């Protein structure tokens, strides 16, 4: 196992501590990731994503989806089976699980649906207005005097 020192990153940058923490978490996480249940992550639009998880045998009441501190938690617990059954072959695994997905900043869960044994979780990246690119008007300096920026009333094109 390799250990990386992120102190040079902290000395030369401001505000990138979340990236270093994320990289540190990925490097120190357990090597063997659980493979149950299988899932897909797809990009459905420029700022939209969908996580589809195979949850055959679970009802919507037995599933839980919640977001805590930029982490999406998906879990399932099968209710106790009242009727005792004798299986000759049991290939549908309905064991309890919990999956976690790290979400980037400004990504929120827009909804979840359960259909045909699949749990679909839709995600949207919403960039705040303060982070969107904007054009800054450059005031022209006249030789005859100074003009304040507030005096320029021309519309700014985006």
Image: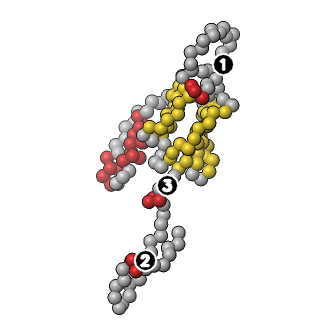
Q: Residue at x 53, y 30 (%)?
A: 64
Q: Determine whether the residue tagged by mark 1 lies in a helix, strand or loop.
A: loop
Question: Which badge, 1 or 3, is on the more N-terminal residue?
Answer: 1
Query: Would you name the residue on which mark 3 appears?
Result: 127
Q: Secondary structure at mark 2?
A: loop
Category of crowding for the residue at label 3, using alpha-carbon neighbours closer than 10 angstroms: few (below 14), some (14–19), many (at least 20): few
The CA span between labels 1 and 3 is 44 Å
136 relative to 85, above or below: below
Checking the image for residue 138, the label placed there is 2
Whole-percent x, y for residue 2 in the image: 39, 36
Mark positioned earlier in the residue sequence (2 or 1): 1
Secondary structure beneath dot 3 equals loop
Q: How many marks?
A: 3
In this rendering, the answer to whether 141 lies above or below 64 is below
Distance from the alpha carbon under mark 2 to that under mark 1: 68 Å
In the displayed structure image, the side of residue 89 where residue 142 appears, left or right: left
Nearer the observer, 62 or 30: 62
Alpha carbon separation for disc pair 3 and 2? 25 Å
Mark 1 crowd level (few <14, some 14–19, many ≥20, 10 Å Cα): few
Residue occupied by mark 1: 91
Task: Please tell me in which quadrant of the rendered image residue 29 appears.
Answer: top left
- Number of other residues with Cα within 10 Å of mark 2, as a class: few under 14, some 14 to 19, many 20 or more: few
Q: Earlier in the sequence, mark 3 or mark 2?
A: 3
Foreground: disc 1 or disc 3:
3
């Amino acid at each position: 196992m390799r250990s990386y020192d992120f102190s040079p990153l902290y000395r030369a940058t401001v505000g990138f501590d979340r990236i270093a923490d994320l990289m540190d978490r990925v490097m120190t996480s357990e090597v063997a990731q659980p493979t149950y249940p299988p899932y897909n992550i797809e990009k459905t639009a420029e700022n939209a994503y969908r996580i589809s998880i195979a949850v055959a045998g679970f009802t919507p009441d037995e599933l839980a989806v919640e977001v805590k501190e930029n982490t999406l938690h998906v879990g399932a617990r099968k209710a106790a089976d009242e009727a005792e059954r004798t299986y000759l072959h049991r290939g549908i695994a309905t064991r309890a699980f919990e999956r976690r997905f790290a979400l980037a900043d400004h990504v929120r869960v827009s909804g979840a649906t359960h259909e045909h044994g699949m749990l679909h979780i839709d995600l949207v990246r919403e960039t705040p207005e303060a982070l969107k690119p904007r054009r800054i008007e450059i005031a022209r300096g006249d030789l005859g005097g100074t003009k304040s920026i507030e005096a320029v009333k021309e519309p700014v094109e985006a």
